[in-house]
Each structure stands twice: as structure tokens, then as C-alpha cells.
Amino acid sequence: MKVLVADKFEPSGIDGLKAAGCDVVYQPDLKDDALTQAVRDTKADVLVVRSTVVTAAMLEAGALSLVVRAGAGYNTVDVATASKRGIYVSNCPGKNAIAVAELAFGLVLALDRRVPDNVVDLRAGTWNKKEYSKARGLHGRTLGLLGYGNIGQEMAKRAHAFGMPIVVWSRRFATGKDLIANEPIPMQLAGSPAEVAERCDVLSVHLALNADTRGLVNASVLDKLKPGSYFINTARAEVVDYLALEKVVRERQIRAGLDVFAAEPSGATGTFSDPIVALPNVYGTHHIGASTDQAQDAIATETVRIIASYKDTGRVPNVVNLAKKTPATHMLIVRHHDRPGVLAHVFEHLRNGNINVQETENVIFEGAQAAVARINLDGTPSDALLKAIQSGSADILDLHLVTI
């Protein structure tokens, strides 16, 4: 299996892929047209990226069957095109959660004690203990979390250790998928992002970027913050309305710690301009949340695990673009002798009946003499079609139809 790695990747990950029997092409500086051409020329089966954007042209250029985003999100991959072409898209959720939470909480501490301003004045030869002795402290202050995935959970652990009450909004609780009472750390549930902002002293954003979250943290949320509150974003810039954030920073003395920006340079270095980072109450970092040695080693290990599983078993861990629900309406259950041609006979009759197979599994009994096939269909086969399937093969022992 040929793997094209088109981003900087840990040497341990390259070694792990080779040890798994993969043919590795490591070209970490590829992007845009050069990456499209490399996909075409290498005929790679697997593409590994971190921040590099994966476009429809790249997905259509060669023989890719799997794209691994070596990180938590996957908004830089054209998932819709990958799904149309039957290309798996996988990621490494949770492997950088601790690193991002460490930076987010570091920004909270930096805002409270004004650490960067202390450093700047000391380097300039200015001693100003009178000014920098003013700090509120975090104990007893409420941390508000928007999102409670892997990173949000790590933030909660750190806030709890600092004696901070926690209020959270997350769809996992809103939908009833999980109960906040079952969480190991005591928290209070809010009914909306605006309610979290209204109740907290520190608001930290940990939401994945998608159609539902784009621009979610807007003026109606930010205006609910108490004057002098702290705001942290280590998620995605597009989740937050930065114009609205700039307004509350200017007018209501909100302090902000930001690791992500709307117009970041495409490379690891370059010129950068964003008016919000010039504000005295804003501390910015260079989109480094996941960039610790520990996190990158963990992501490399997970990437190797995903690709090795695909190579050896055909199964893709952490796949993000399989259908949660197919158009299937019925399941055809066929008990049969485990012999060549039986399922081909069934599928041929279904094709002639213009019924599409959505999913299928064939379970073999001990001794490999008999099997049961479960075949999900997007329509209802007629009684005549079912009779033709059963009577057309002596190896079919029984069949019946179930509505799903």
C-alpha cells in the first residue's frame, strides 16, 4: 500500500508506516497543484495531511481510497467529494486534546496575571510591580465551556483542579445523548451559548467547525459576557464573529486569548495582519494548540494504527464519512449453503427487480457449511421475486423479509 504524506510528520510515524509494510512517499511541502500532480503521479492509495487543504481535484486525480487528517478536525478535506468517490476520510480525535487544553488554560492564566505585558516591560527595563500586582485570581470564578468533546473535558479537569465552578453547553447534553449528572466533574448545564456567556467569568470555545457552528459565537452571545470577563478561542476562527469580539474588547474591557484567526498564513512562517491582535487586552498565539511533542507523537501513532488497520483488515478506524442512515427500508435474510454463486444468484435477481443493495453481511456458521446473509434493500421485493430467488437455487435453505 502506497502512502503519500503531504505535511510535516513525526519520524516515528514514518518509521511506523514502513514497519507496517507501507511504501511511504514523504513530501511535506506539497500543496495546491503540486499536491494534485503528486497524487496522480504516485498513484498513492492513502493521503496523510495535517493543515494542508485537500480539494476535489486532488481526490479525483489518482487512486486514493483513504485520506487521513493527522489531527482532530477534518474541515480542510472536501468530504463531500470523497464520499461521492467512495474515499474514506479518517481523523485522530482526542489525541491532541491535552495539548490544546494546556494552551487554552495557559491563556486564561496569562490573561489573569497579564504575563506577556509583564515580560515586555521587564525586557524594556521597566519595573512596575504596582501595576501588575492587580489580578483577580481564578479560584471561585466560573469557567464557561462551549462544547464538551475531548478538549472541553480536559479543560473541565483543569478548571476543577483550580477550584473553578463550570457551566457548559453542548449538543451531547441538549439532545439527551449524555447526562451531565453522569460526568465525573461537577458541572451545571446551560440551555444555550448565550446563557453560558451570561453565567461565566471565563468563556472558552471548544466547538468543531461545521455548518451549525459557523458564526455561532456572535454578538448575541458575546454581548452577554460580564464586563472584564475573559474569552478564549483555541477551536476555529470561523466559529466566532471576530468583529463582534473586537467590539466587546474595546467597549466592555473583555480580555481575549486567541490561538486561531480568520486569515492565517498558509505556511509555517509568513507575514500576518489582524487588527484584533493589536488591541491591548488581546493575547494571540500562532495556532499552536496541538503543537506539543506529546500530541504529535500520539497523532502519529494513531495515524499509523488507522492505516495499518486499513491495510490488514480493510476496516478504517475513526472514519467520518460513512452514512449514518442509508435509504434501506427492508432487510432480506437468506439462510443458505456456503457455496459459490449463491449470493450472486440473489443479487442478480435483485438487480433484475431494480432493487439496490445498500449494505450486506454474510455470517458463516462453524464448519463453513452454512451461512446467513443479511442484505439491506432500498425497496420492497415482490412476493414473486422472493419466490424466484428461493426456487432458483437449491442451496438457499430459507429466506424472509424484515421491514427496517
Image (cartoon, rainbow, N blue to C red):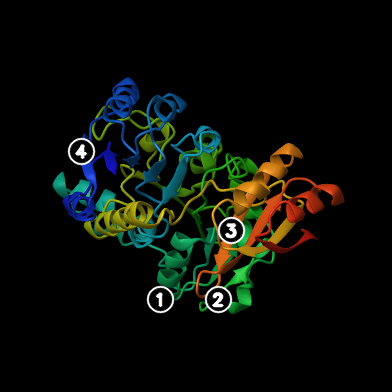
Q: Quadrant of residue 5?
A: top left
Residue at mark 3:
361
Residue at image coords 64%, 73%: 179
N-terminal of the two: label 4 or label 1?
A: 4
Amino acid type for the residue under numbered disc 1: Ala
The quarter of the picture where residue 277 lies is top left
Q: Position of residue 371 (x, y in %)?
A: 59, 66
Residue 232 showing in the rendered view:
yes
Q: CA distance from mark 4 to mark 2?
A: 42 Å
Q: Is residue 250 above or below residue 370?
A: above
Residue matched to label 2 = 183
Classify mark 4: residues with Cα within 10 Å, few (<14), some (14-19) or many (20+): some
Label 1 to label 2, Cα distance in Å?
15 Å
N-terminal of the two: label 1 or label 2?
A: 1
**Residue identified by numbered label 1:** 161
In the rendered structure, the answer to whether residue 59 lies left or right of residue 373 reads left
Residue linked to disc 4: 26
Element marked by disc 1: helix
How far apart are the two marked residues, 4 and 1, measured between alpha carbons?
A: 42 Å
Residue at mark 4 to residue at mark 3: CA–CA distance? 37 Å
User: Camera-side residue: 57 or 251?
Assistant: 57
